[in-house]
Amino acid sequence: MKVNLVKAAPWLVVAGMFLIWELICAGFNIPEFLLPAPSAVWAVGVAQFEPIMMHATQTFITTLAGFAIAVVVGLLIGMAVGSSPFLYRAMYPLLVGFNSIPKVAFVPVLVVWFGIGTVPAILTAFLISFFPVVVNVATGLATLEPELEDVLRSLGASRLDILGKVGLPRAMPYFFASLKVAITLAFVGSVIAETVASNLGIGYLMMSASSSMNMPLVFAGLIVIGVMGVVMYELFAFVERRMTSWAHRKPNGAT
Amino acid sequence: MSFVKFEHVDLAYNPGGALAIEDVSLEVKEGEFVAVVGPSGCGKSTLMKLISGLKPPSGGYVYVDGRQVGGPLKIVGMAFQNANLLPWRTTLDNVMLPLEIVEPYRSTLRKERPRYEAQARALLARVGLAGFEDKFPWELSGGMQQRASICRALIHQPRLLMLDEPFGALDAFTREELWCMLRDLWQEQPFTVILVTHDLREAVFLADTVYVMSKRPGRILVRREIELPRPRDLDVTYTDAFAGYVHELREHIGRVRAS
């Protein structure tokens, strides 16, 4: 019974939020162009199902492409920065500075370079989501126990040996944890770019809907993004648990 | 002929900075069990780094097996206070780790895996870990982890075993159990041991020779041979002769701390 309640709780919270939202809209008689009720959003979602799905697919693929680049680049930079204290000190200020730039400010630059369309959206998704991967991989590698390194080095292990046998496996929980954060950020990036510079994708759909005051469609777009984010987050949380179960052991596992 | 030899060794971690150890000279024979005791921060662990070739001396010479140490030696096994087992590997795979790095095991591991695995299992059985080979480290108690850690240090049959306070984090009973385990391992298959510890009873019980080091910068103050008959049993720790050694060493340490 208790377990069931725990499992149902997230759904109940979501259902409760929509219920309160619906009641507020009905009770205060809020006009649809300010805040559409969930029922109105649902109606639009059903009526415009096909165009919404088309734009959602575009956003989804764009996000995944940017995310994939972010994972590869993030792993490489993270490995470099994490295994060399020199590179760590040399690169960190630049990385932090770069991460502090609002990526929406960078989209116009990408548009000048690559034109309107999918490429700036992929790149924005990549730029916004690679930083957590870098930080986590670097942290995982840099916090290697010095004694363990001594054990291996006294055996004549090369840096590559240490990285492969100990560093990378040890960094994996950090890496998979960063994927959860990175995938949700990637959605933010691709949608931002789409609202500014695209004629496809959920971001574009919302922009064009809001310019014609079609607020139910705007909210339908927001909900679709949210759902995609949650689904991908849960997917990577599942992958994380499967790949690094040793790091998520129960505290009473000792015999 | 000495197996490990220090000649007037100094070490400063930063060039020109404070010395961690100063003018250390000592000789260890092959097969000898040596303990180094001293107040904390006296550079005991520095000795280990020098012998294993992880740090070059700032002055003087370190010889192991008649040759000057110039880099990591592969004939050395090490274990520390923290067992440092890899949590994603089973106990058996943790013990096998050195074989994946040291030649000639490294290049023959693929072909000879069953044989090496049998060796690792036999070693684990000798320290009382039979049946725990496929457990993960977090499923073992602290004492068991330390046993596995010592197996990892011995699996490639090193000629020199270096232990840095390996039993420091264990409770008194477990610690005495592991003393006996180490004693048995050493007596069955002789190798040279350098044990760094601050437990005087541990040093006297296990070692042939005890060195007392001073506060930073670490110097060797006293070299004491322990002439208790072998094989030693835990009962020996309650004899007058044993207490005499411990007492004598304790006085030296007391003087170091007071100075």
Image (cartoon, coloured by chain):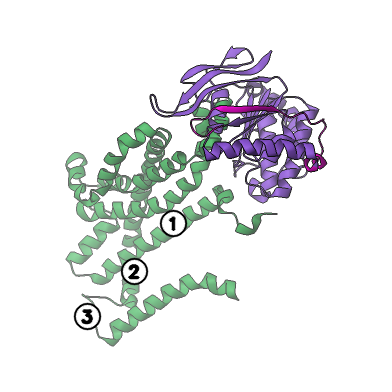
Chain colours: A green, B purple
Q: Is residue B203 above or below residue A63?
A: above
Amino acid, disc 2: Gly
**Few, some or many C-alpha atoms within 10 Å of disc 3 (few <14, some 14-19, many ≥20)?**
few
Do the dots labelled 1 and 2 sit on one chain?
A: yes
Label 3 marks a residue whose chain is: A
Inter-mark Cα distance, 1 to 2: 23 Å
The residue tagged with tag 3: helix, strand or loop?
A: loop
Q: Which residues are magenta?
A: B214-238
Q: Is residue B229 magenta?
A: yes
Which of labels 1 and 3 is toward the front? 1
Mark 1: which secondary structure?
A: helix
Q: Chain of mark 1?
A: A
Q: Are marks 1 and 3 on the same chain?
A: yes
Asked whether, in this view, residue B9 is left or right of residue A31, the answer is right
Cα gap from disc 1 to disc 3, whole angstroms: 34 Å
Q: Residue furthest bottom?
A: A27
Three-letter amino acid code at the position of disc 1: Tyr
The residue at 21%/43% (across/down) is A110
Work out whether residue B54 or residue B66 is closer to the camera in this orientation and state it: B66
User: Sequence order check: which comes first, mark 2 or mark 3?
Assistant: 3
In the rendered structure, which disc, 1 or 2, sits on the residue that comes first in sequence? 2
Q: Which residue is mark 1?
A: A233
Please report the residue visible at 69 percent of the width from the left and 46 percent of the height from the top.
Answer: B143
Residue type beneath disc 3 = Pro
| Chain under disc 2 | A
Q: Do discs 2 and 3 belong to a common subunit? A: yes
Instruction: Identify which residue is drawn at 47% across, 18% down.
Output: B59
Q: Which residue is mark 2?
A: A45
Q: What residue is at 56 percent from the left and 30 percent from the top?
A: A152
Give the position of the N terminus of chain B as an image quadrant: top right
Residue with the mark numbered 3: A31
Coordinates of residue A252 in the picture (x, y in percent):
64, 59
